[in-house]
Image: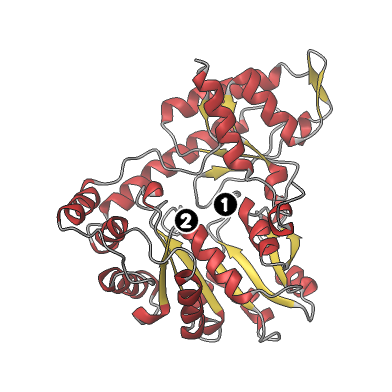
Amino acid sequence: MENLSNRVNSLSPSATIAMNQKSRDLQAKGINVINLSVGEPDFFTPDHIKAAAKKAVDDNFSFYPPVPGYPDLLKAITEKFKRENNLDYTPQQIIVSCGAKHSLANAMLSLINKGDEVIIPAPYWVSYLEQVKLCEGNPIVIEAKFEDNFKITPKQLEGAITPKTKALLLCSPSNPSGAVYSKTELRALADVLQNHPGIFVISDEIYEHINFIGGHETIAQFDDMKERTVLINGVSKSYAMTGYRIGYMAGPLWLAKACDKLQGQMTTGATTVSQKAAAAALSGDQSCVAEMKKAFKRRKELVVKMVKDIPGLQVYDPDGAFYVFPKVNAYYGKSFNGTAINTSNDLCLYLLEHGHIATVPGEAFGDPDCIRISFATSDEKLVDAMNRMKNALAALK
């Protein structure tokens, strides 16, 4: 460790990846583990998208692509923004990267200086804090309370702003809570930011299409916020393309140029074949998106109902994404065969070892009273998993 950079030593490992690996380790020993830890759709990539990838191979798209992305993909992204979000961007304002996580890193590294503060509502996705730390910025965490459906209020936002605040990081629909901000709620946050013109919004909208309450709303829709907003999106969740590693950002031209320069010194362009597949995803038949959302809604209703049936758990019925984030602290202080459960990490390890269910502790998301359960798997596995959870929790005394 002493030879490693302070930058790397300051980072925490990803809790979701760690729990996923623990699940795989047990599965390798022949144990039937139901993995509800990873944020990955269980669907296969739709056939028309796979066909585009195969065609790209046959058409010899095997050479370096342009750093910001192929022109046809950039065009498809601008058309998607106009069609679905009524937002006008030029292709020059779009940068395609190796996943939405990469797009987030590009934006933060281009915006955040040492000592800058980035406001992050908790619960938050595990990588947000670590990426701010990587930029030598200071994450300022504000609690989005269970009682407020895991959404921050304008008063909370105002109270967190200081002269050092550089950005607000929003995620809607949210990982891990499933909270979705309405147009009215976003406008109220934007009104606060009008008094602080130097603050940018980094808006992670990767779960845009997994929305159970109607149309998606973005803070970039407001004329007074568009030039101050960096939109982060991608094809992983909506089109079941996690392994293709294609994300993209849209923002003011000066920032896109900066991210182009940065990416040119790090990864160059995203994978050629994946870009062609992503262009087909965004431009082609969208019925696959609606079908997957329908399945996620059914699974959500199934899991919420079963979690509510487990004594001691409290659950917010999520409006989007594919997670439930129940409060489990009623089980803290209990034990099994002399092993005490005092934290959500303890509880998740117990559920993995004794219930053979992989979940993720809330500590990783900034809320130690909760655990994250992904419902991006089959109905049958979800029913089995929730029954295992109920039985395992009932064994705690």
Q: Quadrant of the C terminus?
A: top right
What residue do we see at 40% from left, 54% from top? 245
Q: Residue furthest top?
A: 337
What residue do we see at 31% from left, 46% from top? 291
Is residue 329 visible in the rendered image? The answer is yes
Q: Is residue 160 above or below residue 272?
A: below
**Image quadrant where residue 115 sits:** bottom right
Q: Amino acid at mark 1?
A: Asn
Q: Is residue 99 left or right of residue 37?
A: left
What residue do we see at 31% from left, 61% from top? 275
Q: Position of residue 12 (x, y in %)?
A: 69, 48
- Mark 2 residue element: loop
Q: Is residue 216 above or below residue 374?
A: below
| Distance between mark 2 and mark 1 Cα atoms | 8 Å
Q: Position of residue 87 (x, y in %)?
A: 40, 78
Q: Is residue 236 left or right of residue 25?
A: left
Q: Which residue is mark 1?
A: 175
Q: Nearer the viewer, residue 271 or 122?
A: 271
What residue do we see at 22% from left, 60% from top? 61
Q: Nearer the viewer, residue 85 or 307?
A: 85
Q: Which mark is residue 207?
A: 2
